[in-house]
Image: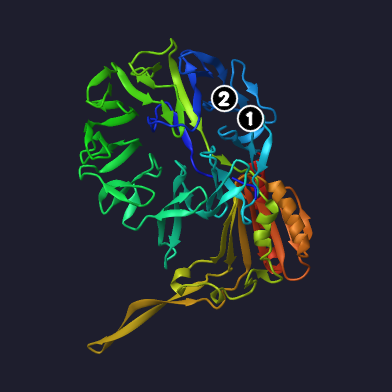
Amino acid sequence: MKLAHISCMLTVCAGMLLSSCGSSDGGSIDYIAVKTEGSDNWGFVGPDGQMLIDDEFENTPSAVINGYFSVTEGDYVVVYKAGKKPEMVKGLDDLAAAGVMNEGRMPICRKKSRIELVDGSGNTIATLGPVNGKEIRNVSAMFTEGLMTFNTDDNLTGAIDRDGNVVIEPKYYTINTFNDGIALASIKEENDSLSDVSIKYMIIDKKGETIYTLPDNITPANYTIQSGVLAVNKDEKCGFINKKGEFRAMPSKVKQISEIHGSIFTYINSENKYGVMNMDKEDVVRAKYESLYIVDDDLFLAMRDNKWSLINSKDERLHKFEDIKHVFCINTLGQFSSKFQFITCDENDIYTLVDKNGNQIGHEEFSSFAITWNYVTSEYFDMTLAVKSFTDKITDTGFDKISIGEPMSEFISGEPRQYTGTYSAEIYDHSGYRYSYTASAYSSVPISLSEARYRTENYFGYTYKYFDHYEYLFNPEAHVSKITIEFSTEQPDYNDLRAELDNQFADKGFKYIEKTDAYATYTDGKDLRIVVIPRHNLYGASIYIMSPAEFASEKGSLINSAESRYRSSAD
């Protein structure tokens, strides 16, 4: 079976703190996107401070990872192989989306198509079709340890290998990044009440087999396994579990565990101060900083009193960043390593590359920088299946189990009081991939009526009448006069929708009465009429099923509404 995942989406831009300074070996960040001072467009700078290209791209390109990057040009995403003169990858110039080239594969999506896996030459390795009858909604940005997770139309997550074969069936709610062959996953558990949903976490291997299920009293503190352990909270204590589920509690002053690097980790205490501790529960750096990031085993980026410094494990200041508003640690991001070290931002919002000694790298200064990548979303939309999801329910007398002329009280639930003064009731709600619809039944009179009830009392020979309460009753005159279906799509596919409606209505025995760009009317030649008009901005359609009498009464107003909507959308 061929396929793909939704896992990691990471977008890092100037003004956003980068997430990690720990070690990684999942690939390399070769260049980052920058705007040099005085430039209007984007280029790339390397870790040595030298510009690969400058003032080249109008839109923000992704980072260059493993030699490749992508950028939006006009209406399309284009993939390039990086160089002094970027080389467009053959066949990858008309995309809707592109992920990251890692482990020899990149997920891409062409306009209105399913997601594909391509190699470095642009050759398609696999096209990701449905899994267990469900379309792939999106995939993660890249492969990690040979796997890419995918999310299906019914919100289940699984994973594929580099050839697009499903190796973990989509049965999970989430699967996080694999590290050393294991990952944190979760499933949704619905209880008796539909609104009562709980999340159950487990550690799985690369075959999707559960190694350890977290009991209810253990919850993840973060969602990525690092250095073979997962930070968790257990009975209001912070600590770690390994893949066997063995728990190691940390001292009570540890209120939150942040970043793990080998045998050390950053933590936050009850005063929201950061420190560094080792797995033997010994303080490496006392918790006194507003921010603290691990650069390597004996180097940390710390901020105290809004001043940034580089310190070592003895808490000695090695360098103080003068007149600097912010420092970004970029020696690793996510799973990727890099030779980049730091970017500083001064009070004038000028960005500079800096090394571990606090010295500027190269001579360029930047007005902006960005390190971005995104998950890839499918643009494939099966209009036939989407339309069949409701046309299959149109019957000779109405929709699903509801018939035109049927008493409203026969199929609605709840007390009469809920429907006093109302004329409609929802009868069906459905959501699918990139579409949804709601079906409702309407009456020409209120569904329920209220009648005042009074009481009488005698005082000194006089009878007095007092209001007592309202009694609510279903209105016996309330019958289904029409059924509406509000069908919505994510894109303005109105012409495709109308063509599909024509085909499927014809299959059910309906013929045209009248057809224009703005609306269409149909008849089954007997008891039903159907009117189709566009929704706002052509994102779907409103479909009305009614009796011939109701059709004669409402046709004029519906057509006026259709023409108004169509004109406003065309304008």
Q: Residue furthest bottom?
A: 461
- Say above or below: 133 vs 143: below
SS type, badge 2: loop
Q: Is residue 284 left or right of residue 145?
A: left
Q: Where is 153 relative to 402, above or below?
A: above
The tag earlier along the polypeptide, 2 or 1, is 2
SS at mark 1 in the image:
loop
Task: Answer with left or right where residue 341 lies relative to residue 298.
Answer: right
Q: Position of residue 269 (x, y in %)?
A: 22, 39
Q: Residue at x 48, y 53 (%)?
A: 173
Residues at badges 2 and 1 in contact (C-beta under 8 Å)? yes
Disc sitting over residue 120 in the figure: 1
Q: Position of residue 90 (x, y in %)?
A: 69, 28
Of 342 and 112, nearer the camera is 342
Kind of residue indicated by mark 1: Gly
- Assess disc 1: are there few (<14), some (14-19) or many (≥20) residues with their C-alpha within 10 Å of its C-alpha: some
Name the kind of residue labelled 2 in the image. Gly
Q: Is residue 112 visible?
A: no
Question: Going by the image, does 23 lie left or right of 106?
Answer: left
Residue 117 x/y as whole percent: 63, 39
According to the picture, the residue beneath numbered tag 2 turns out to be 67
